[in-house]
Amino acid sequence: MNYIAVVTTIGSLAEAQHIARTLVEQKLAACAQISEIESFYVWNDAVQNEKEFRILFKTTEANYQAVEDAIRKLHSYELPAIHALALEHIYAPYAAWIETNSSRQT
């Protein structure tokens, strides 16, 4: 089993909380962590500087597409940042917890 951390950013805490709670409740992710950040990026040919909230979801690689689809459905940005990082070294009991809690029952 391969484990990943999926990351997105969002403009408001309320929206970040809604997305985080929804994906955890749907068992697409075992955990979602929200951090306040400051972002600099180019949009519409101008450098932007905004406060945002980063959500980090811990899940399995097999769930990536469903997680991406759910984020895209719930996200208010025209072009949301959605990317995943492999969790290459992971404490085995914690990995088992991720697997158990990010496995939808069909």
Image: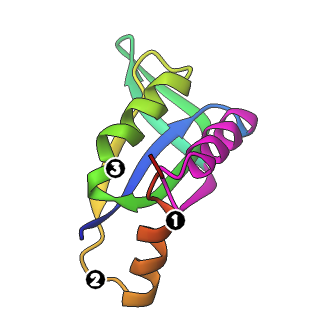
Q: Residue at x 28, y 83 (%)?
A: 89
- What colour scheme has been applied to the protein in the rendered image? rainbow
Whole-number angstrom distance, CA of label 3 to CA of label 1: 12 Å
Whole-number angstrom distance, CA of label 2 to CA of label 3: 19 Å
Which secondary structure lies at badge 1?
A: helix
Query: Position of 84 compared to 7: left or right?
Result: left
Residue receiving disc 1: 101
Q: Nearer the viewer, residue 47 or 18?
A: 18
Quarter holding the N terminus is: bottom left
Q: Nearer the viewer, residue 98 or 11?
A: 98
Image: magenta residue range: 14-36
Residue receiving disc 3: 63
Q: Residue at x 30, y 39 (%)?
A: 65
Q: Residue at x 75, y 36 (%)?
A: 14
Query: Position of 30 compared to 81: left or right?
Result: right
Are the residues flagged by discs 1 and 2 in contact, CB closer than 8 Å?
Answer: no
The kind of residue on which mark 1 rests is: Asn
Q: Earlier in the sequence, mark 1 or mark 2?
A: 2
Q: Alpha-carbon neighbours of circle 1 within 10 Å: few (<14), some, or many (≥20)? A: many
Q: Residue at x 69, y 37 (%)?
A: 18
Q: Nearer the viewer, residue 7 or 100?
A: 100
Percent of width and height locating residue 24:
59, 52
Q: Alpha-carbon neighbours of circle 3 within 10 Å: few (<14), some, or many (≥20)? A: some
Percent of width and height locating residue 54:
55, 48
Q: Is residue 29 magenta?
A: yes
The kind of residue on which mark 2 rests is: His
Whole-number angstrom distance, CA of label 1 to CA of label 2: 19 Å
Are the residues flagged by discs 3 and 1 in contact, CB closer than 8 Å?
Answer: no
Residue receiving disc 2: 89
